[in-house]
Amino acid sequence: MKTPSRPPQELAAWQSLARLAERRASASAMPSGGRATARSRRLGPLLVDYSRQLIDDDVVDALMDLAVESELAGAIDDLFSGVPINNTDNRPVLHTLLRAPDEACPAEVAAERQRFLAFAEAVRVGERRGYTGKPYDAVVVIGIGGSQLGPELVVDALKTPHGLNVRFLANVDGAAATGALTGLDPATTLVVVVSKSFTTLEPRVNAETTRSWFLERTCEP
């Protein structure tokens, strides 16, 4: 299918949502905490609880109407079936394959996923170590946009008190790099640079900054 060109703001469901938003902006009471079951969804092992949000059945219905009017289901099918929805480059967006079950993706994708999962597990259990032979106790992830926001959300949601110290570096402001690296030992810190092209400015600058931080503390003058 072709993605509808009509702006969502022109759709009837959008207008309904706008009216509902105005009504709720003046409301002071949150929805009742007793409705948590109705305002939560299980997605595999995850529980998404939005019971404390300003949302009720009218809002949910309007959102569902918006999805229908926007032909969202067809757009999702296009994404997963490889239709070239990237209009700038006229190509499909296939990173979804990385999250598909092994039996539903090409063999090379499944093999690469098993390779990086094995590497991550080796870091966690101490088989993979730093240059002095000490196990890693910290990870600095350098990326921006989708290479940083999603992973940081998952780490923040699922972190444990005794796991690796995982920090993210996206901003090229020097204060961001200082905050991400302060207190870390380069001998026990694993640095991961996440980028599809390795031409994006922010990851390149932060990778160079982190490299300098590492060399200044590990190389003889």
Image: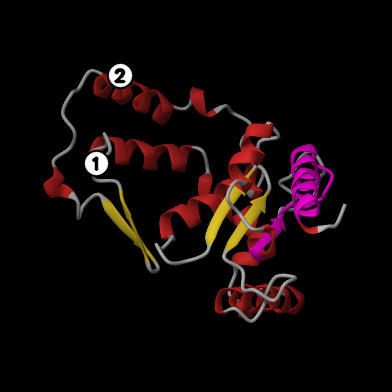
Confirm whether residue 125 shows in the render. yes
Based on the displayed image, in which of its 4 quarters is residue 109 positioned? bottom right
Q: Measured from the top left, where is residue 16 in percent x and y? A: 35, 26
Residue holding disc 2 = 22
SS for callout 2: helix
Task: Label the magenta part by its dominant secondary structure.
Answer: helix
Question: Is 127 rendered above or below residue 198?
Answer: below
Residue holding disc 1 = 52
User: Which residue is more in the foreground, 136 or 72?
Assistant: 136
Crowdedness near tag 2: few (<14), some (14–19) or many (≥20) residues, C-alpha within 10 Å? few
User: Which residue is more in the foreground, 22 or 75?
Assistant: 22
Say which of marks 1 and 2 sits in front. 1
* Residue 217 shown left or right of residue 177 in the figure: right
Tell me the distance, in whole angstroms, between the alpha carbons under discs 1 and 2. Answer: 18 Å
Q: What sort of colour scheme is used for the picture?
A: secondary structure
* Residue 102 shown left or right of residue 83 in the figure: left
Question: Is 126 rendered above or below residue 130?
Answer: below
In reply to whether residue 201 is colored magenta, the answer given is yes
Magenta span covers which residues?
A: 188-217
Identify which residue is drawn at 27% across, 37% down.
Answer: 55
Q: Measured from the top left, where is residue 95 in percent x and y? A: 68, 58
In reply to whether residue 203 is colored magenta, the answer given is yes
Confirm whether residue 74 shows in the render. no
**Dot 1 or dot 2, earlier in sequence:** 2
Q: Name the kind of residue labelled 2 in the image.
A: Glu
